[in-house]
Image (cartoon, rainbow, N blue to C red):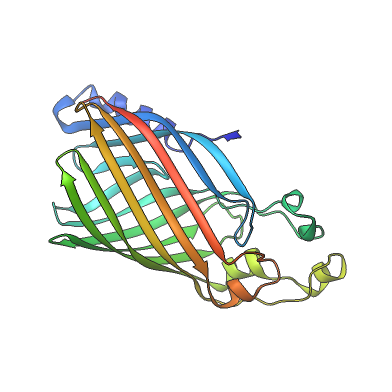
Amino acid sequence: MSARAPGVCWGLLLLCGAARAEGEFHASAGPGIYAGPDFPGAHHVRKLLFPFVDAEYAGRLYTSAADLIGVYAYKTVDTQIGAAIAYDPTERRARDDDRLRGLPDVRETERFKLFGSQTVGAVTADANVARDIAGHGQGTLGQVNLWLTIPFAPSFSVSAGPGATWADSRYMHTLYTVTPAEAAVSVLPVFAGRAGIVDAHLNGLAEWVIHSRYRLGVQAWLGHLRGNAAASPISVQHEQTTVVGWIAYRFN
């Protein structure tokens, strides 16, 4: 079990800003756990403990889980448009699988993300484009999702729906390509990954508010690799599952 701290520094920064305008600041914090594939296409699971921080200042500046720091350019009850610096835990290490020996390691990265969402009734559509800004070769990802939200009670709601992820050639080269030089020193054959759809997935989100102060939540992502991501010899399992859970205390 490893520990990571995405969002903590930004959360503390926002808490300091709240001292000047308490009425415009809202925050929740607590422990969280992430469980997902060791690397894209893996069948082993990697677990991370992290501090879950969800805070917003003046309806514009925010931090939330993987979004280290973000800003809303436009926000209403039904519409959100903005940008964020996001943490992407995706990585690949040669020691994760004997088949990866001879392939370079891929490091976790930070991304600059543009996003937007629109809600009509119980249905929400969202989309985002996120580019690697840390120079770790993880290129650009695009994602679209559709959610149906069912509020079973004022303190308990469930959202679920389908989505798809697209990746550029840079991302596909780093995560799914096996070059002739790499094939020569590994057990994998040569393979060239090209830009295109990476997966089709189903999202799920459930959150409970307990005694008005505690938030208990779980988010699941059930994906199936498609196209070159599925065809790559690096991928040993096409079904990919990621689960994130948290319990947080609401400060105000």
Q: Is residue 193 above or below residue 82?
A: below
Residue depicted at 63% across the width and 51% down the height? 38
* Rendering coords of residue 229 (x, y %): 59, 71
Quadrant in the rendering for residue 21: top left
Q: Is residue 155 left or right of residue 231?
A: left
Residue depicted at 37% across the width and 50% down the height? 84
Q: Is residue 96 left or right of residue 147?
A: right
Q: Is residue 237 above or below residue 156?
A: below
The one nearer the camera, 212 or 126, is: 212
Q: How many marks?
A: 0
Q: Is residue 50 left or right of residue 161?
A: right
Which quadrant does the C terminus fall into? top left
* Rendering coords of residue 58 (x, y %): 19, 37
The one nearer the camera, 228 or 47, is: 47
Q: Is residue 225 left or right of residue 249?
A: right
Q: Is residue 142 above or below residue 68?
A: below
* Rendering coords of residue 4 (x, y %): 54, 35
Residue depicted at 62% across the width and 52% down the height? 91
The one nearer the camera, 230 or 89, is: 230
Please identify the residue farthest to the top as the structure is shown.
Answer: 19
Please identify the residue farthest to the right as the structure is shown.
Answer: 185
Please identify the residue farthest to the front as the structure is shown.
Answer: 152
Which quadrant does the N terminus fall into? top right
Residue depicted at 37% across the width and 58% down the height? 203
* Rendering coords of residue 61 (x, y %): 27, 41
Quadrant in the rendering for residue 156: top left
